[in-house]
């Protein structure tokens, strides 16, 4: 298998930059903004996020099936990415810059529209990436390039408001959302256009030979896929518990809200720099062993946050560097590369390429874990009596510190245990590819 050109990786990965630029603030800044500035109750907000996810039970597999069976002169992935772009831009604008009086209903409506747009965008986009190469290690390069673009987008989301704070002395959640939202509206159409125009889409369409329900049964019978998605879900719940709590932790425990943006910059710079290391390590010791290492590093580092208190902002830095380094492999580089391998195992069983259907299941798992983690975090704060609009005592702050620091490590360790004996090694994948090529030749 020939190595993919660097320009192909570059143009393909560009779309993930504006996506991540907008979605990370949704997870980090939206909860505090709508709680503190728009007066939405934390428990109600958690319920809204949970209800929005229920729609994904239908929309995600439907989008996967539709994308896999789309036939146009422009390909089966491109049309849906193009259609999703304006919907995503509008929903981000409405969420980030709500009208006066926009409260719980506004949050629900535009969170739902955004979720649908993300489904239309990401499922075809990630399936496209899995089809760019059939090589075990080349797929790590594809997901690595996409991860670096995504981290670059999240980093841009911190640098823009960080520059505003340094140069003009303006900060806070509302300013971050306005600046990032405006930047995203400019960058997204440019990046998506370059991806659609400059990235080849392999002609892999095959007429459907497997009925939908039978196909879903085959996917459910794919044991490595179940093992991978379960480990990813449980580990990601731990990570997504920390995401909406990040700003609360820095604001109320460290009393340094205006500096939060700088710690996020350190996190994403480290994650960005770490991606090539995780790609290299996966090639050296195998993808699932490298994935295990990222689980263990996160589980080891996170409890140290419990030691921090008011005035300890810069003591947070070494912990953030460790978690950022782990995040470079944990979040997307390694599991997405592994996921592409299990799709080929399904192709061997089903006789057709159903990449988007698998990515729809993965997308649902990804969005579900974001909501479950967020629900646990926000309901947990409410259970501890935390008040986002008032003062909090030692017990409430201890609850926040525990939820942010130690509790997530239980999920990281559980995820590691699940993926410990993952069966698709480089050698096993070579056997799968050989069987597929023999079948194609025959």
Image (cartoon, rainbow, N blue to C red):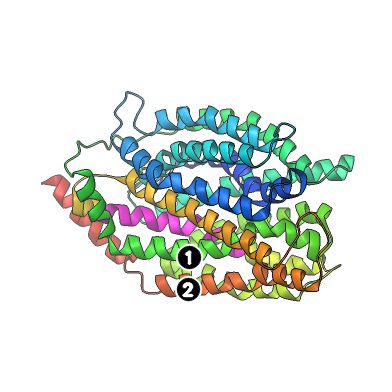
Identify the residue under disc 1: 234
With respect to residue 409, does 260 lie above or below? above
Instruction: Give yes or no for residue 322 being in the magenta stretch.
Output: no
Q: Is residue 266 in view?
A: no
Q: Earlier in the sequence, mark 2 or mark 1?
A: 1
Q: Going 32% across and 64% down the picture, which residue do you hit?
A: 224
Give whichever of 187, 83 is nearer the camera.
83
Identify the residue under disc 2: 414
Among the 4 quarters of the image, the one containing residue 65 = top left
Residue furthest top in the image: 73
Q: Is residue 65 left or right of residue 439?
A: right
Residue furthest left in the image: 442
The magenta segment = 325-345
With respect to residue 153, does 310 lie above or below? below
Among the 4 quarters of the image, the one containing residue 301 = bottom right
Give whichever of 422, 95 is nearer the camera.
95
Residue 247, position as x, y percentages in the image: 73, 56
Q: Are marks 2 and 1 in contact (CB under 8 Å)?
A: yes
Residue 418, position as x, y percentages in the image: 41, 72
């Amino acid at each position: 298998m020939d190595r993919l050109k660097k320009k192909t990786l570059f143009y393909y990965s560009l779309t993930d930059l504006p996506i991540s630029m907008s979605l990370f603030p949704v997870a980090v800044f939206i909860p505090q903004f709508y709680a503190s500035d728009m007066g939405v109750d934390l428990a109600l907000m958690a319920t809204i996020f949970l209800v929005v996810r229920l729609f994904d039970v239908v929309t995600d597999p439907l989008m996967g099936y539709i994308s896999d069976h789309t036939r146009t002169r422009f390909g089966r992935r491109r049309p849906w990415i193009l259609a999703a772009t304006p919907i995503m831009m509008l929903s981000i604008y409405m969420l980030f810059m709500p009208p006066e009086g926009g409260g719980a209903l506004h949050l629900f409506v535009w969170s739902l529209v955004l979720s649908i747009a993300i489904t239309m965008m990401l499922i075809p986009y990630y399936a496209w990436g899995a089809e760019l190469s059939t090589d075990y290690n080349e797929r790590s390069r594809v997901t690595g390039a996409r991860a670096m673009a995504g981290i670059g987008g999240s980093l841009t989301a911190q640098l823009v408001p960080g520059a505003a704070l340094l140069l003009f002395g303006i900060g806070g959640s509302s300013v971050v959302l306005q600046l990032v939202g405006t930047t995203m509206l400019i960058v997204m159409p440019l990046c998506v256009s370059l991806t659609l125009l400059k990235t080849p889409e392999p002609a892999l369409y095959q007429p459907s030979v497997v009925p939908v329900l039978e196909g879903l049964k085959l996917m459910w019978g794919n044991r490595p896929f179940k093992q991978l998605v379960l480990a990813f879900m449980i580990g990601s719940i731990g990570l997504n518990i920390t995401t909406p709590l990040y700003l609360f932790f820095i604001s109320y425990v460290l009393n340094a809200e205006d500096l939060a943006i700088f710690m996020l910059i350190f996190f994403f710079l480290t994650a960005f720099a770490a991606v090539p290391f995780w790609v290299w390590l996966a090639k050296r010791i195998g993808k699932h062993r490298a994935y295990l290492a990222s689980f263990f590093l996160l589980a080891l580092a996170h409890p140290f946050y419990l030691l921090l208190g008011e005035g300890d902002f810069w003591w947070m830095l070494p912990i953030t560097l460790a978690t950022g380094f782990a995040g470079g492999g944990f979040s997307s580089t390694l599991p997405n590369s592994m996921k592409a391998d299990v799709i080929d195992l399904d192709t061997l069983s089903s006789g057709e390429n159903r990449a988007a259907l698998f990515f729809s299941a993965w997308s649902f798992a990804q969005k579900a874990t974001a909501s479950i983690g967020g629900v646990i975090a926000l309901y947990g704060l409410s259970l501890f009596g935390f008040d986002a609009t008032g003062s909090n005592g030692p017990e409430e702050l201890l609850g926040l510190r525990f939820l942010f620091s130690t509790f997530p490590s239980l999920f990281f360790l559980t995820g590691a245990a699940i993926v410990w004996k993952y069966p698709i090694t480089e050698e096993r994948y070579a056997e799968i590819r050989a069987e597929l090529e023999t079948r194609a030749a025959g």
